[in-house]
Amino acid sequence: MAESRNILRMSQASVVTRFAPSPTGELHLGNARTALFNYLLARRHGGRFVLRVEDTDAARSSEQHIASLVADLQWLGLHWETGPGAANPDHAWRQALRGNVYGPCYERLIASGAAYPCYCTATELDLSRRAQLAAGRPPRYAGTCRKLDEAGRAQRVAAGRKAALRFAVPAGQVIEFDDAVHGPQRLISDEIGDFIIRREDGSSAFFFCNAIDDAEMGITHLLRGEDHLSNTPRQLLLLSVLGLRAPSYGHVSLLTGDDGAPLSKRHGATTVRELREAGYGANAICNLLFRLGHSTPDTGLLTLPQMAAGFDIAHLQRASAHLDPVQLRHWQRAWLHSLDAAQARDWLLQWLPPQIEEDSLDNLLAAIRPNVLLASDVREWYAILRGDALSFDAEAAEAIRSAGTRFFAAAAAAAVSPERALDAAALRSATGTKGAAFFRPLRAALTGQLHGPEIDLLLRALGAERIRARLAACAEALPSAPQ
Ligand code: GLU
Ligand code: ZN
């Protein structure tokens, strides 16, 4: 017995972190960063990472959002020891199934007088709130039901009123904690109104189950959004009344758009799913998030283990972090660059039609790869290299017109055999031009634009037939300028 208690103490001494999303929407970058930081903190210290789903708000939570959260986090590579699918029963990670944990805590609070039923209706609460605001006081629960005696309660029950459960905040207590990001915090309990810990419908309220679970799951450290900093004193009070151990908290700055406003739709793609579908790599996203609100001397692309080794709570910054699309593209470029041939092929193939019957697939991919950053770029180059109808941009149309039809007739005539068609030097000497006077119109005729793959890669990706056909088309009629 004594021995097993020792083991318990030892395992509690190691770091346990968690990410505790509410499954009410898609995982956006702000939450993904919180997940990453907690994951890295656990890995850094050889600890455990817990994924806890906070789904007590049944009306707003959904199975579909749980599934997409799980898929997004797994795709990012943030694997957990406790959480969905990790050989744990569902009640180990899912709050809606943890009534057995919460029930006894409610009973203890009620029995000791630390919690009481509140029968106030939404209208009554609203009236009281307005009255306080009008009197220039901060609105908080007026304590109406705290004063009720047994008879008063019985009367309300008899009138068919439903009760929520409120925590009776003890008076005159000083609540102090050291936030890992914001430093020492101090609050007097008198500034906190009695708050709801169980809703009228019997479901557990956030302040309560979030804190109880942190203690019950042995969470030692947690990082969460700054919007929760003001909730922490309430949660500490609750835990201390229950004699439960509180984790150490760190509240990370909010993630904003590049204009400083909270991330929203108008900042473009901000959910993990949107970015994945746009072609961003998980590692590119993690490298970006690692540097948002966390300073690091490492400027190169890092793997998750390297990030874990370099993750430091002391390097979390208080100022809000801006999501910069340029930075996102920077990491995407660095990530694509880091891929070996097989990985790059897999990534490219995801964005191409499933059955490309091609003996020249490798040539196609070799031409596309250096010119793309995202899925849309891959699709665009595929359409250029394999499509039937080219569209010419203004610069390209101009380059073709100034070369004149004879240039293309000569080049098309030189492309008689596959060997000659793929030989840039042979085409060039047939046209009697050199340098830009050769490459610009050639590239324009073959792709409809002046930028793109190296000529040799381009010729191989197109193949002799397409080269001949595209050159011949320009020999017949110069493209008209785009409207
Ligand atoms: N479910 C809460 C949220 O998503 C968790 C907050 C926390 O990490 O404690 O905001
Ligand atoms: Zn009340």
Image (cartoon, rainbow, N blue to C red):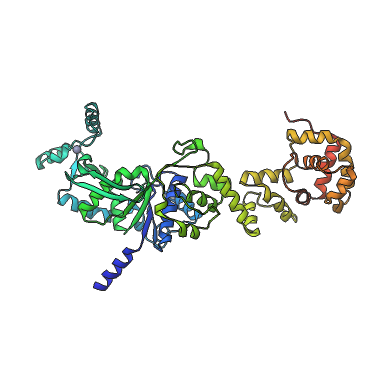
Judged left or right of residue 278, residue 171 is left
Q: Is residue 11 visible?
A: yes
- Tell me which residue sits at (15%, 38%) in the image: 156
| Quadrant hosting residue 125 | top left
Tally of numbered discs: 0
* Quadrant that contains the N terminus: bottom left
- Quarter of the rendering occupied by the C terminus: top right
Residue 341: image location, x then y, percent: 66, 58
Residue 350 lies, in percent from the top left, at 62, 51
- Whether residue 162 is visible here, answered yes or no, is no
With 354 as the anchor, is 449 left or right in this view?
right
Q: Residue furthest front?
A: 297
Q: Is residue 341 above or below residue 469?
A: below
Q: Position of residue 149 (x, y in %)?
A: 10, 41
Instruction: Work out whether residue 406 or residue 201 is closer to the camera in this orientation and state it.
Output: 406
Q: Residue at x 22, y 39 (%)?
A: 191
* Residue at the image point whose x is 32% and y is 64% from the top: 13
Q: Nearer the viewer, residue 304 or 3?
A: 304
Query: 21 or 358, which is in the foreground?
Result: 21
Q: At which x and y percent is residue 70?
A: 45, 53
Q: In the current view of this chain or complex, which residue is farthest to the top?
A: 134
Rendering quarter of residue 10? bottom left
Q: Measured along the vertical axis of the image, is residue 438 above or below residue 247?
A: above
